[in-house]
């Protein structure tokens, strides 16, 4: 009782207040940082986490949540939200060239349409502020006409009303305070993004700290018709409903940047209908199944046989056992990289052993066999261990009864032990299948999915499985397609989830029976 | 007739044993082959197997020396990163996961059943499937909080913690359910509050299973490659897995010797850890097997 009471009282309360104070301070700092950057979602998330934390830990009626809260926050932030986001991305056109919002894309398109005018008109410029507004004094060296310009207008200055320097450039006018060179240097981003609109629809844009150029707008957007006209090329573009402005005459002629847009089930449809996507996808899909099934069968076959062999009263049994489980103890990424070196064409030990120079990595079938062999090496101990466990779980009297009935050893094995073993191990075989279905590190580290037939424009390699193909689609190469990658992720999830559900339901039934 | 049968049976058994020995030896050669090669080439100053001879002829520490002195290969730094990441993940995961598991196992509250079902559903979804989403998300986090955004060990730790939380809570809850309820009740009668029951009764009792969970989390983090390779682009931030892969991937022929030395150094502590604790780890495996 005395020992217990040390945990309550003022000391504990003080500790709690200090700790929560630190957490609150950290979250507040993060909130302010997010507010400063106008990140929207992040502010909301940080604020929510902070407010809920204070409610949970200072209220007296939330005892279970005091224990659950940190775990729940982590689960929601880093599993539930990414899963939700994956689902969302899978129905969006979200790829290189289509990553920003429509407004941002429009701004960029209009900016891209700003080109120097035919005469390459330039201006000498003095930057400063006028009534707190970012203002420029501009003088054309050719005509010696001077202007005062800000983000809203460009106005011609009447000669005599402003101060000039030796070159006849305007350098001062009433109310105008020029920036010091230091101030100019600090305003770099403001200067490069500044645009001064001329009355005729053209713009003057600063090029350096002291010069500006006249730009004409060649791209015009008509809000009423929704048409984008490029006066330079004479082409007319229309929103194609899939995140891009496309030429009215030739829909394949798209303007970039495009924007992120909802495209219903087009990513999924692409997988099945678009020949450039479908071809590799179906090949990868078949190999993923073949690889996962093949791996499980190989590992289970060799592992079970090993378990049966070591289940006897053998000499050196303990020695054998400790060697056999070694691959399970070595970090798997290391083993895979070691095997990669072993199969090397020039100096690899496999070629050294047979005095050959076989290029395992450039032949589709050799590479596939190699992947299976390495996976067997990696998985053998696990299957040996679970098979041993299952063998020992079979009651000995079953065997004795069968022996009395005159069954031979092989009959006992085939007719009694094997069916029982399969029943016991089925859930583990299923989960092993699910694991190998997504065995990213093996494929990625050993072959990188290759060999890839680049000459025929193949995007998927001979040993690519769905998860490595997803990774390539999302992150590798010149163009990244998050939308398509997310759609493949959802398909993988469907396969894995239905297997897991089946296995869970099965094990629950087994629990009830037991 | 009877003696003949016995003889025949004896003969068959020893023949079976002989076959078993042969089969086991084939597998042992297969298993030991790469391990032997790595050990051999880590001490081989030429670093390559050109002669085709598998009997070591030279011995030197040159490969090990290079790993600790070459500024382009910050191997000690990689090991440190991996150990920090794995330790932090193991400790925090067990600490937070243990608390949540305790609540699910011992407390009554509304939404408990739905919470457990949701947990089961969530842990079916492997976190790397949301790879693209996590990437885009953490890229945005980076613009506001660089220490926990893309490219940082802190951000990677958070993603690991979230990703393994579901499984950890689920596993720990299963174990806590087996701790007899009488112990908590006795403590409660003595006037202990729920946090006291947790810290003074439950925590010491669950220590062994917490340790095993922590160990598995440690090994899992040390082995993780996919998220780490996506997150850690800076050469000094890399974990051993990502670092060694990029090091050896660039110039396999040239870097094979130092790589073998690094592989050996990174593996030996884990192998020792595993072998000394194999009873617990394998116990869990076979238990799962027999329970179905």
Image (cartoon, coloured by chain):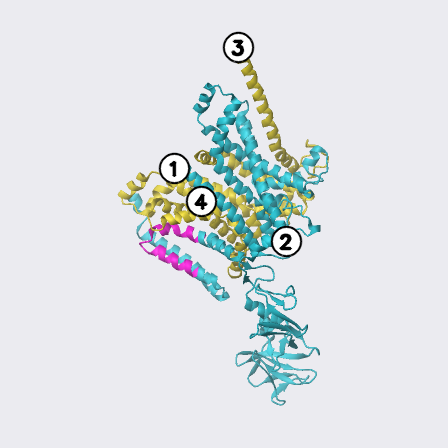
Instruction: Give the main secondary structure of the magenta stretch.
Output: helix
Q: Is residue A149 magenta?
A: no
Span colored in magenta: A46-74
Name the tint of chain A in the rendering. Answer: cyan
> Which chain is disc 1 placed on?
A
Against A362, residue A473 (above or below) is below
Q: Residue furthest bottom?
A: A160
Residue A371 or residue B155, whichever sits in front: A371
Choose mark 3 or mark 2, whichever is in front: 2
Q: Secondary structure at mark 1?
A: helix
Q: Which chain is yellow?
A: B
Residue A435 - label: none
Residue A306 position, x and y percent, is: 55, 29
Q: Residue at x 37, y 58 (%)?
A: A54
Q: Earlier in the sequence, mark 3 or mark 4?
A: 3
Against A502, residue A386 (above or below) is above
Q: Is residue A50 magenta?
A: yes
Query: Residues at badges 3 and 4 in contact (C-beta under 8 Å)?
Result: no
Residue A512 - label: 1
Q: Secondary structure at mark 4?
A: helix
Q: CA distance from mark 4 to mark 1?
A: 24 Å
Q: Quadrant of residue A157?
A: bottom right
Disc 3: which residue: B3
Disc 4: which residue: B168
Quarter occupied by the N terminus of chain A = top left
Q: Secondary structure at mark 3?
A: helix
Q: Is residue A134 in view? A: yes
Disc 2: which residue: A275
In screen coordinates, is A166 left or right of A512? Answer: right
> Which chain is disc 4 placed on?
B
Residue A418 position, x and y percent, is: 50, 29
Residue B14 or residue B211, whichever sits in front: B14
């Amino acid at each position: 009782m005395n020992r217990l009471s040390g945990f309550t009282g003022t000391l504990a309360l003080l500790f709690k207040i200090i700790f929560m104070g630190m957490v609150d301070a950290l979250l507040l700092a993060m909130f302010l940082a997010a507010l400063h950057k106008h990140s929207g979602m992040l502010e909301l998330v940080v604020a929510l986490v902070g407010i809920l934390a204070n409610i949970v830990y200072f209220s007296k009626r939330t005892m279970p949540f005091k224990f659950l809260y940190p775990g729940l926050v982590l689960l929601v932030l880093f599993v539930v939200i990414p899963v939700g986001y994956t689902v969302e991305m899978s129905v969006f056109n979200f790829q290189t060239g289509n990553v920003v919002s429509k407004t941002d894309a429009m701004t960029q398109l209009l900016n891209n349409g700003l080109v120097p005018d035919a005469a390459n008109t330039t201006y000498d410029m003095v930057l400063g502020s006028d009534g707190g507004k970012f203002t420029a004094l501009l003088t054309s060296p050719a005509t010696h006409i001077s202007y005062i310009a800000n983000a809203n207008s460009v106005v011609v200055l009447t000669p005599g009303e402003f101060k000039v320097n030796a070159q006849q450039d305007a350098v001062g006018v009433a109310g105008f305070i020029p920036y010091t060179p230091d101030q100019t240097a600090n305003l770099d981003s403001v200067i490069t993004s500044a645009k001064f609109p001329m009355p005729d629809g053209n713009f003057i844009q600063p090029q350096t700290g002291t010069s500006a150029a006249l730009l004409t707008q060649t791209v015009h957007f008509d809000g009423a018709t929704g048409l984008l006209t490029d006066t330079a090329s004479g082409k007319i573009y229309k929103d194609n409903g899939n995140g891009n402005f496309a030429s009215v005459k030739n829909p394949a002629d798209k303007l970039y940047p495009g924007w992120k847009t909802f495209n219903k089930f087009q990513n999924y449809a692409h997988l099945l209908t678009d020949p450039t996507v479908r071809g590799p996808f179906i090949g990868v899909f078949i190999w993923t199944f073949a690889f996962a099934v093949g791996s499980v069968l190989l590992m289970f076959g060799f592992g079970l046989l090993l378990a049966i062999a070591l289940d006897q009263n053998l000499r050196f049994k303990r020695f054998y056992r400790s060697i056999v489980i070694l691959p399970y103890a070595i970090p798997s990424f290391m083993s895979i990289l070691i095997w990669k070196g072993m199969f090397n064409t020039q100096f690899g030990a496999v070629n050294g052993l047979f005095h050959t120079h076989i290029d395992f990595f450039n032949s589709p079938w050799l590479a596939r066999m190699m992947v299976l062999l390495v996976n067997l090496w990696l998985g053998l101990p696990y299957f040996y261990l679970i098979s041993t466990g299952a063998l020992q779980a079979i009651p000995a009297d079953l065997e004795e009864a069968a022996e009395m009935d005159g069954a031979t050893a092989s009959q006992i094995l085939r007719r009694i032990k094997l069916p029982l073993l399969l029943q016991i191990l089925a859930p583990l075989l299923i989960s092993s299948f699910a694991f190998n279905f997504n065995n990213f590190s093996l494929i990625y580290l050993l072959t990188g999915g290759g060999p890839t037939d680049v000459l025929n424009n193949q995007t998927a390699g001979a040993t690519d499985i769905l998860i490595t193909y997803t990774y390539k689609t999302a992150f590798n190469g010149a163009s990244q397609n998050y939308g398509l990658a997310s759609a493949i992720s959802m398909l993988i999830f469907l396969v894995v989830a239905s297997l897991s559900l089946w296995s869970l339901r099965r094990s629950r039934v087994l629990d009830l029976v037991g | 007739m009877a003696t003949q049968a016995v003889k025949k049976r004896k003969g068959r058994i020893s023949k079976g044993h002989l076959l078993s020995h042969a089969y086991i030896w084939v597998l042992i050669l297969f298993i030991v082959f790469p391990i032997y090669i790595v050990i051999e080439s880590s001490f081989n100053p030429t670093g390559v197997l050109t002669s085709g001879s598998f009997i070591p002829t030279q011995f030197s520490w040159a490969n090990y020396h290079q790993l600790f002195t070459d500024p382009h290969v910050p191997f000690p730094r990689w090991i440190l990163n991996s150990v920090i990441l794995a330790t932090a993940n193991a400790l925090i995961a067990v600490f937070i996961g243990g608390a949540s598991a305790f609540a699910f196992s011992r407390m009554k509250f509304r939404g408990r059943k739905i919470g457990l079902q949701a947990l089961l559903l969530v842990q079916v979804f492997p976190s790397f499937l949301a790879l693209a989403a996590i990437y885009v998300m953490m890229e945005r986090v980076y613009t506001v909080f660089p220490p926990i955004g893309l490219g940082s060990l802190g951000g990677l730790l958070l993603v690991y913690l979230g990703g393994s939380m579901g499984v950890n809570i689920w596993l720990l809850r299963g174990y806590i359910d087996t701790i007899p309820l009488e112990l908590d009740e006795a403590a409660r009668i003595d006037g202990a509050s729920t946090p006291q029951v947790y810290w003074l009764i439950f925590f010491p009792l669950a220590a062994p299973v917490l340790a095993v969970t922590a160990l598995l989390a440690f090994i899992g983090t040390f082995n993780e490659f996919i998220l780490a390779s996506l997150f850690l682009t800076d050469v000094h931030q890399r974990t051993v897995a990502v670092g060694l892969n990029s090091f050896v991937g660039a110039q396999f022929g040239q870097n094979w010797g130092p790589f073998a030395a690094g592989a050996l150094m990174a593996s030996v502590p884990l192998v020792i850890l595993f072998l000394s604790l194999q009873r617990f780890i394998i116990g869990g495996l076979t238990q799962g097997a027999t329970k179905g």
